[in-house]
Image (tube, rainbow, N blue to C red):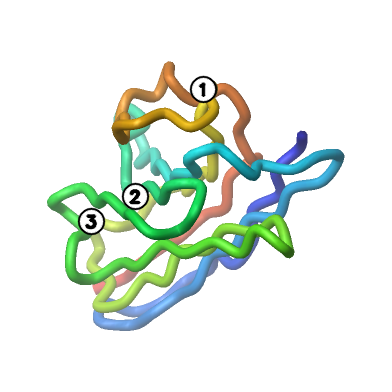
Amino acid sequence: VQLQASGGGAVQAGGSLRLSCAASGGTFRGYVLAWFRQAPGKEREFVAAINWSAVSTYYSNSVKGRFTISRDNAENTVSLQMNSLKPDDTAVYYCATDSRAYRPIFTTYRDDYNTWGQGTLVTVSS
């Protein structure tokens, strides 16, 4: 499976962006999907995850209440709606699939995800 992320761009603080990630060459049904981000000079960090049935989601404290993750298993896509953006949200955003099918508990560890998109840059100006 290959993942292709899109939707990044430049926006002013308080604005919104919607990121999308599409799978090709396979399906990610049965796997948790997540978004991570990496700011310049920082480690890649967990942002949000959604389980295989889209019933459960999990967010980092820094984005909770502002970002919404969703998925469409029929279309093999996962999205991240980002509202009330802040300059601290500036980063390259990556979509990823869990390495373990039907993992019962969300994981925020980067090493637990084994398929990554190429990243899309989000720049938030003050």
Q: Quadrant of the N terminus?
A: top right
Write down the residue under mark 2: 48
Pointer 3 local density, CA inside 10 Å: few below 14, some 14–19, many at least 20:
few
Write down the residue under mark 1: 100
Could you tell me which residue is drawn at 43 percent across and 17 percent down? 111
Identity, as a three-letter code, of the amino acid under mark 2: Ala
The picture places residue 109, in percent across and down from the top left corner, at: 33, 24
70 w.r.t. 11: above or below: above
Label 3 secondary element: helix
Q: CA distance from mark 2 to mark 3?
A: 16 Å
Write down the residue under mark 3: 88
78 w.r.t. 108: above or below: below
Pointer 1 local density, CA inside 10 Å: few below 14, some 14–19, many at least 20:
few
Pointer 2 local density, CA inside 10 Å: few below 14, some 14–19, many at least 20:
many
Could you tell me which residue is drawn at 54 percent across and 44 percent down? 95
Sequence-first tag of 2 and 3? 2
Sequence-first tag of 1 and 2? 2
Q: CA distance from mark 1 to mark 2?
A: 17 Å
